Image: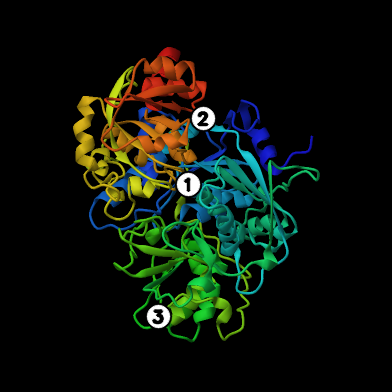
Amino acid sequence: MALNLTQKLINDHLVSGKMNPGEEIGLKIDQTLTQDATGTLVMLELEAMELDRAKTEASAQYVDHNLIQEDNKNPDDHLFLQSATQRFGLYYSRPGNGVSHPVHMQRLAKPGKTLLGSDSHTCANGCMGMLAMGAGGIDVALAIAGEPFYVKMPKVWGVRLIGKLPKWVSAKDIILELLRRYDVKGGVGKVIEYYGPGVSQLSAMDRHVIANMGAELGATGTVFPSDNEIKRYLKEQDREEDWIELEADKNATYDIEEEIDLSSLEPLIAKPSSPGNVVPVREVKNTPIYQSYIGSSANPGYRDFAIAAEIVKDKKIAEGLSFDINPSSRQMLQDLVKENHIASLLQAGARLHQAGCNGCIGMGQAPAYGRNSLRTTPRNFPGRSGTREDSVFLCSPETAAASALTGEITDPTTLDMKYPNVQLPKQPTVDKQLLQRPLSYEDAQKVELQKGPNIASIPKMDEMPDQIEIPILLKMGDNISTDEILAGGARVLPYRSNLPEISKFTFEIIDETYYQRGKETVEKGGHAIVGGFNYGQGSSREHAALAPRYLGLRVAIVKDFARIHWQNLVNFGVLPLTFVNEEDYDLLQQGDVIVAKDLKRKVNEGNEFPIELKGKNQKIQVTHALSERQKEIMLKGGIINWVKDRSIKQG
């Protein structure tokens, strides 16, 4: 039977289940990736599991999100992470080494392997012929401990690329085109696999741009073939021995078919405040901007910065504009310096920031109130930039650089200049200084974890109750993101290892009273929330499930969930339910009290059951999508309790 590449990768790592779309499967995980916004909890979870040493082929902890050191909290956590990686046998990427996804691609990614990361943009490394997926931190902790990763078998969405990109159009416009067609939930339950003659036109880093923003489509992952371009890239990184050729069988088929003619594309832009709100740049031309921002994991390559440098070379940016350059890796930054591109950017008036996530996660470079920000980052959810009432547009480096010159959104095809011909360095830098290798087992056993005063253990979680009578504390609409549930940024993320403190920011963008109202329900049985479609889109940060749970959230009833957040809710004992009849959403109001009796039996024995609205003489049918394994986790009150219970029984 002919297989597509996604099916080959899954089949090679399948440890349980069958490859039928929608059925839960267990996958062997070869590599893991954690970053400092999520990794602190992962390391605490490994400590709680009493892990002796990582069981994966390679696991890496990156410090790329929380780089601002305004007090002791971030540097204390960096020391904790460093000591934890030494103790458990992980790689450690120090602050300043760069964003996890391109650095992992440079140093550790291998065609044919599986990668699980506690960052939703882990799918970026699918550009290397890997099956790379984002997940909650506890799932990654279990993978590090040698456990399979469980996920619903995705459909495979084959996207055939033909033609060649026109001048002034680049990889970012390809993924924006797919978002224009299908919006932010178009990839839910799917792996997007790119193939066809157009793939050969794309560099490894171009593919990274496209694979990265598969997360914005809600996809489980993105897969590209491992071809001669990947061989060239690995050779350039002194890792040619890691290359193997991988592609779909000639007669392979896909569950869903799509075609993009690259030659037909034009510069595109996502308007506020969703990556799926895509239009041609020409439709919003002349819109004034305060900031033009280039960098992040969504445009992390040498070419992305070099072409911007060539566009602004020997020119000056618009008066009053902030032109922010956010290098994605230390290694790539050195090449930009050697080739004088950084000089061109600085001479034009750019501001150079350290290599890391920075403004992409609201950690610096926040835009001014009431002003427009133009960014090459992957997301523009409300508040994502660090400014609560932000207005962020997403675009390519060409559009960002052209607009920096004019001070307003500008179609780069209208510039009075030739399209720059950017050449890659003949001998790219290979820099391993800030990526520390795992210690030997003997040395690792001598390491003690360094815990600063901001690190707090995860509180105990009780079992799922058999009866609930709880109020609906919030009713929300569609596409609520994890940034709206629990914001990132410089105010919030320093508390990533302190659940009682970080919970104070929960749902603040939606309702500032939630924290206090939620706390008041904890001793009274908790509460519920109601949402629309695609609830929990965006980041994999498990804090967005854990903090509401800490504040008493027991049940989430929505029209449908984003994959990673749904799994995080299960992992922390929040019952995720969907409406059997979507119109019943209109019957539920904030303040209503929902009642369910004999809940354990109903969850365990079936998928569909009724809940009552107290005092309204109404019943609403709800359903869940829990596997048999997840039912056990839910009844125990979360995966930590489930793991402990298994350890006791096995011990």
What sort of colour scheme is used for the picture? Answer: rainbow
Identify the residue under disc 3.
349
Q: Quadrant of residue 522?
A: top left
Q: Earlier in the sequence, mark 1 or mark 3?
A: 1
Dot 3 alpha-carbon crowd within 10 angstroms: few under 14, some 14 to 19, many 20 or more: many
Q: Is residue 463 left or right of residue 418?
A: left
Q: Are marks 3 and 2 in contact (CB under 8 Å)?
A: no
Q: Is 375 drawn above or below residue 242 in the view shown? A: below
Q: Position of residue 13 (x, y in %)?
A: 63, 33
Q: Residue at x 49, y 50 (%)?
A: 121
Q: Nearer the viewer, residue 287 or 487?
A: 287
Identify the residue under disc 2.
146
Q: Position of residue 230 (x, y in %)?
A: 67, 55
Q: Earlier in the sequence, mark 1 or mark 2?
A: 1
Dot 2 alpha-carbon crowd within 10 angstroms: few under 14, some 14 to 19, many 20 or more: some
Q: Quadrant of residue 6?
A: top right
- SS of the residue under disc 3: loop
